[in-house]
Image (cartoon, grey):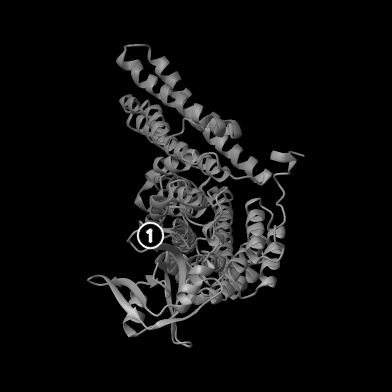
Amino acid sequence: MVSGPGGQDPARVPPPMDPDSPREWCAVAAAWLVRGRPENALEAARQAVERDPAGSGADWGYRLASLAFERLGRDAEAVAAAEEAVRLAPGSWAARLRLGAALRRVPGRWRESWAQASRAVRYAPEEPDPHALIGDLALLRGEHRRAENAYRNALRHLDDHLGARINLGLTFLRWGRPRGHHDPAWPVDPRETGRTRRAMEMWSRQVRVLLAASLAAVVTVAFGLGMAAEARIGGGAIPAVVLAITLRQAHQIRLWPYVPGMLARDPWLGVSVLIALIAVAAYVAVIATLPRTAPLLIFGPVDGVWAALAALVLLNGAVVIVLRVLVEAWRGRPVRALAEFTAVHEDRTARRDIDVTLWLVAGRAWSALVVVAGMTLVLDEPEWAFAAPAVPLVLGWAHERGGLAPCLRQVLDTDRWLGAALALLVAASLALGAAAAVPALGLPGVMGDWSRQAGAGMLAALVAVFAARSAWAWWRGAPGPWRASLIMGESGDSRPPGDVRPPVGVSEEVRRTFTHAREVVLAYADPIGPRVLAIGSVSSVGPDGELRLIAGDDAWEAAERDPRVAVFVADPLDRRFWVEMRGIAVGDTEAAVLRVAPKHVVVGEYPGRHQSRPRSG
């Protein structure tokens, strides 16, 4: 067992010095959360709440309990505890943030989570965590521009915010959730939309496989056995089977009103359904125009169209897979994303996203080399291959701009398949470049042929490496070399999250000053500038320092425009000192008071024979 200073175990948290102090129990709970022990944190938070359910800092105990429940996977209880924290301290940005974070995990409550996160930003725009939560919620909906702006705001206030840094990189990659078909703002369980998606995917897959297998059999019977009429009759019965499959899968769909939105949010689901419909139409046309003899493209345009339709039915699945791989590789700005990931490369999530992003870069480079090799072959112009050596230069540029120097070796040690893929890319590009240089240097043409064949072989080997890496990931249940393996970052560093920060403490001296003050001044932001307003009095001071002010309509309207206010009072006895409380004002219509939750308290002496002496309240 590793011991810390004084022989203490660093994994343990000492009990509170005062067992009757709720704040000390909350501090213990926060320490357990930092150590990754939510069970212990929950017990300590319960001790705090039980000792003073509505007293000083009670909302802190409920916030800590909420986060502990969340980390234990008990989302409903996490929301309930966070709602109690908001009830006790409606002006606390930390309570709003905690409730927004808890609601984010509950299906169908995205809009409520967004509302709470927006309030947290409004209450504490200087804090990074509310901006980060806004970014997370926007990213989950695929609103990449809004998420990018939110993460930049978070990093402006805290440059090393782990979650914001990683997720900002995901916005550059135009990342989407694996369940991209589901809009978190929909008031339906994502499991229900998932069933609808699976039904559409199953329908598309079954129809396309059935049509391809049926057409292969029809072609074999018609052209191999010379029984075109019988083949046409047998093939003509397949659309009835397609209709039966369609009716069966349609019966599985319970959320028809959401289907158009799902197709719009998940382009590949829409492509899959569209390709199946096109395949059905192409199959019917192929069977209706089935020739008696095997067609050749040179026979004429009619035979050429028939062969193209038949190829569409037979090969659409492979074409869609290749198209998807290429589109996913060329989507987003991976070098910009790498620069964000490598800034926090010590984090495991960041290293995983670096690995996946490098595979996307490799996919781009491979497709560029394939185009170069294809143009060289089709046009019979070896000069096209002079562009191939640019690939290592681009990879070097990505290494420099992406900040990979501190972590590339560690990433390659973890994923040796990636190292092999990058080596093959460089070797293939050099081989193709050498093939282009052979005629220019007057060397024997056979050397150019060898170089060209070697480059093509390396490109094919890279496909095999990718397939092997994918199969290994599937077999081991590990992250694969594809975009779906990218994951969002969480604020999992040693810094305690903002939603469990302790509330501001208010001394007895300050509490008495507000309680007995006869002159109270409220400062707030007016559309034309700062303004101060004399208000009636402080109705009461809560155990946690919350002020309840009796104020006029002007103050209520000001709090609705901007809840950030400051309250000034003077020492009611001999006016030796003044108190300034900056906080968040929230109107309580039932009690007809403004509730001001403290964010910062300053106490100072009036100028005179003594200098001004501000001190914490």
Tell me what residue is drawn at x 64 percent, y 55 percent. Answer: 33
Considering only vertical position in the picture, is 27 above or below 582?
above
Residue 29 shown left or right of residue 118 in the figure:
right
Disc 1, SS: helix
Residue 458 shown left or right of residue 52 in the figure:
left
Q: Amino acid at mark 1?
A: Arg
Q: How many marks?
A: 1
Q: Considering depth in this image, is 80 or 56 the residue closer to the camera?
A: 56
Q: Considering depth in this image, is 397 or 24 the residue closer to the camera?
A: 24
Mark 1: give few (<14), some (14-19) or many (20+) Cα within 10 Å: some
Tell me what residue is drawn at x 37 percent, y 27 percent. Answer: 393
What is the x, y in percent for residue 11?
71, 47
What is the x, y in percent for residue 288?
46, 63
Q: Which residue is mark 1?
A: 146
What is the x, y in percent for residue 415?
59, 34
Tell me what residue is drawn at x 46 percent, y 73 percent. Answer: 513
What is the x, y in percent for residue 437?
34, 18
Using the rendered image of the protein, determine whether residue 86 is visible from the camera's viewpoint. Answer: yes
Considering only vertical position in the picture, is 362 above or below 147?
above
Using the rendered image of the protein, determine whether residue 282 is visible from the camera's viewpoint. Answer: no
**Quarter of image, res 1:** top right
Tell me what residue is drawn at x 50 percent, y 27 percent. Answer: 424
Residue 322 shown left or right of residue 80 in the figure:
left
